[in-house]
Image (tube, rainbow, N blue to C red):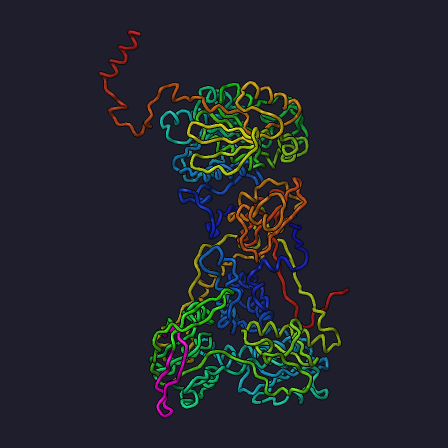
Amino acid sequence: MKPTNTGGDAYYHKVVDCQWACPAHTPVPEYIRLIAGGRYAEAYMINWKSNVFPGILGRVCDRPCEPACRRGRIDKEPVAICRLKRVAADMKDDISDRLPVAPEKKNGKRVACIGAGPASLTVARDLALQGYEVSIFDNGKAPGGMVRTQIPKFRLPDSVIDEECNYILDLGVKLELNHWVKSLKEMTDGDQWDAVFVGTGAPRGRDADIPGRQEAAKHIHIGIEWLANVAFGHTTTVSPRVIVLGGGNTAMDCCRSARRLGGTDVKVVVRSGFEEMKASPWEKEEALHEQIPIINMHVPKEFVHENGKLLGVKFEIVKAEYDEKGRRNLVPTGEPDVFMECDEVLVAIGQENAFPWIEKDIGLEFNKWGLPVLDEKTFQSTLPKVFFGGDAAFGPKNIITAVAHGHEAAISIDLFCKGKKTADRPPHAFTLTSQKMGIHEWSYDNQVSEEERKKVPVKALEKTLKDIKLELELGFDPLMACSEAERCLNCDVQTVFTPKACIECDACVDICPTECITFTANGEEDDLRGRLKAPAKNTAQDLLVADGLKTGRVMVKDENICLHCGMCAERCPTGAWDMQKFYIETAQAGREAPRT
Amino acid sequence: MTYLAKPKLLRPDTPKNALGYTKRDYEGAISTLCAGCGHDSISASVVQACFDLDIEPHRVAKLSGIGCSSKTPDYFLGNSHGFNTTHGRMPSVLTGAAMANRDLLYLGVSGDGDSASIGIGQFAHAMRRGVNMVYIVENNGVYGLTKGQFSATADKGSKSKRGVVNNDSPIDLVALALQLGATYVARSFSGDKEQLIPLIKGAMRHRGPALIDVISPCVTFNNHAGSTKSYDYVREHNEAINRLDVILPKDKITATYAPGELRRVVQHDGSVLCLRKLGEDYDPSDRVGAMNYLQERHALGEIVTGLIYVDSTGEELHRYLNTVETPLNQLGVAELCPGSEALEALNESLRRG
């Protein structure tokens, strides 16, 4: 194998698995250390800079970081990263003097954002800080988009959304609510806007088109529309017997909301098996915790009604069969259909994009799935001044992805407005700093905690089921937060190896608790992976290979299971190993492109 | 300075041996030796050897004297019996323990000061009596604990860290052991675990006195140019005569060798020492030849490593003294103290003789 190039930010960034997995690349270990130290406001600001909505995401993020967490590979469960983020948001003191201010002198460029969801708000923040005049248009009553309308208040209170939207609006961003943009052409014609950002999400709920749908329409609701009505207080009650169709997070929000609005017999019925359901595992857990049965492998066949009055739903029982290519087919088992009685049905079987307000003849192309044709990196459409982001760009994903899109789109808009090429992306900023303070002293806590993952305390179920606005989770208290934070392995503190200094004494090999260091003859990657002291089976994680040793061997380190305990560096007599903190902030609008 | 214990977290695919133990179960306390000390590699090799041989930790007694080397038993086999004796007296304490209970595996750990200076008499007599033990000398050529004076194994003409030249002739413990009747004699290097681990395993399965002289660089006082026990010097002058694989009776033999390439030695317990020849023809069963070879190579400035001599038919002290097989702690009062009549009878028999 060729020796690893550890210059630049590419290699070490991938070692920080949580940060690498986060679409917005939030510096997770850095803010977790600050939480352990009780420095909540600083932890919050690192998050705010990177993911814009720490309080919101600390409650409802899809947490791509947690399955990636290295702790999960050597312990039962990963670090509770998401709920630690909430700790920073909840426990911080006043941060007003830490927030940046928009320049008083504007740069004369005007940008319109359509939709007031997380993608648009991110674009608005990044650009307002660069002196842009940004206006956001939304047909709703309050900013936040889907975050506001679809996530029940018992998971995410309005106060949290208000606080974090206001940080952005306070930068001088104009917000036009109850404003339905009915034509993109009107926005792009002329020079009233230098650029337009479309962040309108995936606003259309998929319907269940089966017999009885039209006749019983009064009792059958589209999940996301129903949730929006609940969020704004238009819907305050539900019938006692409710069936929720679908197995995603929206379905989980629907069933749990129904439980709180008077549903006494609420159940979720899903086509797929329990494991394959799209809902996050913790959301399924919450539904089960609220005594909501989840019935799997049932496909809805008919809404049974009597003169338009819904009696229940008929289901066909299926099983999963896999073809040679591993694709799943749901085939009927032949068992008799099942009839379940109910008074109301909530349909939460998916969302779709819809752009009825975009004219077909203005040069903006759409692909066969009805999504805009975009440059995957710049989010620029075929109409150069129009950019997309969030669910509107590549279909429904999640909030943190929308934020990441927003940052990238803001960079593109900034470049575009300055007349530069949108493809020339600005560099990420990173530092690599030794953490050595003494022979056995490091400026991070290198003792690996053996604590188990903490469960977030919740309010009593009977109390929370009575009030749909009462937040269920209490969040960690400071001691729990500190203990959970200590579980972080500090994967951003890198094991940096200098072959020139190595005397090949094997001290690092002998001390490494997970045997991830090997000195051996070089070979091809597959061969080398099998020959290591502990075979490196996770091919998704790159090996650190260094040559230039006196014996002609190579040093190979499998990053996959490294605990970042620093013992290799402590036992190294020559300082060939050092623990160095890699801190990376991904590029945002306004950062200068590299000089070429 | 704080020394953190190794985290207990294990990777999910951590291998276990036949007893269900992981390698970590054979470790001891965290080492407080200097970073980079060769002794730590020897400790790691002992851990690996015991793991590979499925040794029950409580069936091992590790004994040592005084010195950096003699501290190391604290850093491996934390669940075994241990005895830190006075300086140079490990062999006699070990002999006594072995006499009292022959069921344990006796591992003597010593250094060049402990064995070649203050304890050389003890070393010599343990070898010549044929005590059934593994005797590991962690040999770095200096007195590390007293700031790096030459030890008795330092080569003549080698230089100390401050530039002083050693004028005394060195003691070669391997040569002494050969001469004194050890039946398993090896030399190795702490920086070459591939060689060292099988040598320890072979010694642990050997019956009789087994000496392994391990050159183990002292990073603090003896790892400079001019030293003959530095990592660089040993790597440059290392002449390995063979490579050992220890095959246990339960193991399947998978490797195949060309005829003449391999020598097999079957030990008392059925384990097989497979010796792959490196370089010229060398016969590890020829004691006189081994002594000559050692001297020749030493004169050329080479360090001979590998299994230098093995006699799998040799006997050991218990046999010579015709001791009781049952450990003394398992004998009852009647056997241990047969009474005044038996004593009288014994005395009488001696008088007549």
Q: Position of residue A337 (x, y in %)?
A: 35, 78
Q: Is residue A231 above or below residue A11?
A: below
Q: Nearer the viewer, residue B208 or A459?
A: B208
The verdict on residue A342 being magenta is no
The residue sitting at 51% across, 39% down in the picture is: B44
Q: Residue at x 72, y 77 (%)?
A: A416
* Residue A336 in the figure: left or right of residue A232: left
Q: Which residues are magenta?
A: A292-315
Left or right of A238 in this view: B143: right
Main secondary structure along the magenta-highlighted residues: strand
Front residue of B256 and A349: B256
Residue A89 image position (x, y, % from top left):
52, 71
Residue sitting at x 61%, y 21%:
B295
Residue B15: x percent and y percent? 46, 47
Q: Is residue B53 visible?
A: yes
Which quarter of the rendered picture does the C terminus of chain A lie within?
bottom right
x, y percentage for residue B50?
A: 45, 37
Q: Is residue A535 above or below residue A551?
A: below
